[in-house]
Amino acid sequence: MQSYTIGQAARLLGVSPDTARRWADAGRVKTHRDEGGRRLIDGRDLAAFSIELANSGPGTGSGEEEPSYTSARNAFSGIVTAVKLGDVAAQVEIQAGPHRLVSLLTREAVEELGLEVGVEATARVKSTSVHIDRT
């Protein structure tokens, strides 16, 4: 089974290595040491922890904000990093942890939502075709 270093786990979770280290120190995610003394997290443990994090975050009824009602289950919360406005259409980029998402939408929608660089936003993805690559 594949194992991940604290740094690799942090990148996959979209947090700093210090945050991942604190979670490991607090026992929120199980670690073990390799022959070199590095702390590692088993892939299955990291996957389970990432689901736990997603289910305990904002928008899940945790009390931090109202839950959203949508059929799109793939939500990427992040920060708007670029907005390119055309006469009718617009392109918006969001950085959500390690993920860069680009969406094409109407200029009117961008203006109504008040989307501009530095604004927190959530990209929701719903697709009938999802491709998965093993890295």
Image: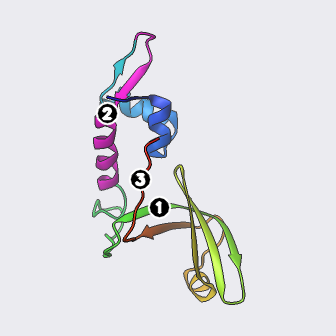
> In terms of secondary structure, where does tag 2 sit?
loop
Residue at 28%, 36% in the rendered image: 44
In the displayed structure image, the side of residue 58 where residue 107 appears, left or right: right
Dot label at residue 29: 2
The residue to which callout 3 is attached is 132
Say whether residue 48 is magenta. yes
Q: Earlier in the sequence, mark 3 or mark 2?
A: 2
Where residue 65 appears, x then y in whole percent?
Answer: 36, 66
User: Which residue type carries mark 3?
Assistant: Ile
In the displayed structure image, the side of residue 23 where residue 117 appears, left or right: right
Task: Report how many numbered discs are placed on residues in the image.
Answer: 3
Residue at 41%, 53% in the rendered image: 132
Quarter of the image holding residue 47? Answer: top left
Give the CA separation, mark 1 to mark 2: 22 Å
Give the CA separation, mark 3 to mark 2: 25 Å
Where residue 63 appears, x then y in whole percent?
Answer: 30, 62
Dot label at residue 77: 1
> In terms of secondary structure, where does tag 1 sit?
strand
Q: Write down the region rendered in magenta.
A: 35-56
Where residue 97 appears, x then y in whole percent?
Answer: 52, 51
Where residue 53 appears, x then y in whole percent?
Answer: 34, 48
Give the CA separation, mark 1 to mark 3: 21 Å
Q: Earlier in the sequence, mark 1 or mark 2?
A: 2
Q: What is the quadrant of the N terminus in the image?
A: top left
User: Which residue type carries mark 1?
Assistant: Ser
Q: Earlier in the sequence, mark 1 or mark 3?
A: 1
